[in-house]
Image (cartoon, grey):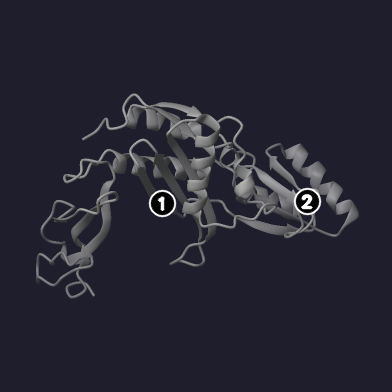
């Protein structure tokens, strides 16, 4: 059942231009009218550059953004996102971008979210002691299409410069640091409007959320009926040994907790022997 939210006003709780990717997807996928909650200062809940520490987990922070936007706009349908960056939880040598999107619908008492983890990020930072080191880092992380942040040292916010996208500004600011000290610190600006890589991950997360919002529970008819777990064990077509491929998906309603198991979610009843631990160890 699609069209559950059709015709309603939805506000995006963001000050970092995430509407650039969110608005067209939401309007097309949910048939809502989208606007931005102007005047909302989400930096009060934490900044990537460290001036304000985020004290809550990402989902709680996204919920707080929604609540602040509701207070500001008087709207009962709000969407917020929250991102985190660091080492991938399984591949520690890779940086990762974890994005959360939360839709809060006060009219229907709904809170529906999705999480997306991606390694498509330029998240990085390093100390530099000359312009050559700085420019090599900048080239590696996609500058100038991706913005940079300069600071005197990794943990010192004094004199911090954000949103640098101009090569001349980067060199001038770095040279000023190096004239008064032996080194500086450069890092990627992870705010959405200065980071196209992150904006792409936000877009992918929105697509996942829209799929979830357009999937309604067969029991209560409310949106948010989605896969929450996969059961491995699809048998090998040659020897019948259970493989690591999903045999079934468990769908759970985020509202009434109704559950259903769907067998053969990928449309096949056996797995190719090349993925079998017995046939192809």
Cα separation between marks 2 and 1: 36 Å
**Residue in view at x 24 percent, y 75 percent:** 281
Q: Nearer the viewer, residue 70 or 165?
A: 70
Category of crowding for the residue at label 2, using alpha-carbon neighbours closer than 10 angstroms: few (below 14), some (14–19), many (at least 20): some
Asked if residue 203 lies left or right of residue 253, the reply is right
Q: Is residue 8 above or below residue 51?
A: above
Counting from the top left corner in percent of width and height, residue 14 is at: 54, 37
Q: Secondary structure at mark 1?
A: strand
Q: Is residue 218 above or below residue 23?
A: below
**Residue in view at x 48 percent, y 44 percent:** 81
Residue beneath disc 1: 116
Disc sitting over residue 173 in the figure: none
Q: Is residue 137 above or below residue 42?
A: below
Asked if residue 15 lies left or right of residue 133, the reply is left
Counting from the top left corner in percent of width and height, residue 145 is at: 60, 38
Counting from the top left corner in percent of width and height, residue 257 is at: 24, 54
Disc with the residue nearer the chain's start (2 vs 1): 1
Residue beneath disc 2: 131
Category of crowding for the residue at label 1, using alpha-carbon neighbours closer than 10 angstroms: few (below 14), some (14–19), many (at least 20): some
Q: Secondary structure at mark 2?
A: helix
**Residue in view at x 68 percent, y 38 percent:** 165
Asked if residue 109 lies left or right of residue 234, the reply is right
- On the question of residue 197 being in view, the answer is no
Which residue is most to the right?
180
């Amino acid at each position: 059942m699609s069209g559950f939210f059709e015709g309603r006003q939805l506000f995006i709780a963001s000050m970092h231009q995430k509407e650039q990717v969110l608005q067209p997807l939401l309007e097309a996928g949910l048939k809502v009218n989208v606007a931005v909650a102007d005047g909302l200062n989400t930096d009060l809940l934490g900044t990537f550059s460290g001036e304000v520490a985020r004290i809550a987990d990402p989902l709680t922070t996204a919920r707080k953004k929604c609540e602040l936007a509701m207070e500001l706009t008087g709207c009962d349908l709000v969407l917020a996102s929250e991102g985190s960056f660091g080492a991938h939880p399984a591949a520690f040598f890779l940086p990762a971008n974890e994005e959360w999107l939360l839709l809060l619908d006060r009219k229907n008492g709904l809170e529906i979210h999705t999480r997306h983890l991606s390694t498509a990020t330029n998240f990085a930072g390093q100390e530099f002691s000359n312009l050559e080191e700085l420019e090599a880092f900048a080239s590696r992380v996609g500058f100038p299409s991706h913005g940079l942040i300069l600071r005197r040292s990794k943990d010192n916010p004094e004199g911090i410069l954000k949103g640098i996208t101009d090569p001349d500004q980067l060199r001038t600011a770095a040279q000023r640091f190096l004239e008064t000290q032996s080194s500086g610190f450069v890092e990627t600006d992870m705010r959405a409007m200065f980071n196209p890589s992150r904006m792409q991950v936000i877009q992918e997360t929105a697509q996942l959320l829209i799929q979830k919002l357009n999937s309604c529970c067969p029991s209560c008819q409310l949106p948010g009926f989605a896969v929450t777990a996969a059961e491995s064990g699809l048998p090998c077509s040659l020897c019948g040994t259970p493989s690591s491929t999903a045999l079934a998906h468990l769908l759970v309603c985020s509202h009434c907790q109704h559950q259903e198991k769907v067998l053969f979610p990928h449309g096949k009843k056996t797995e190719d022997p090349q993925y079998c631990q017995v046939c192809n160890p």
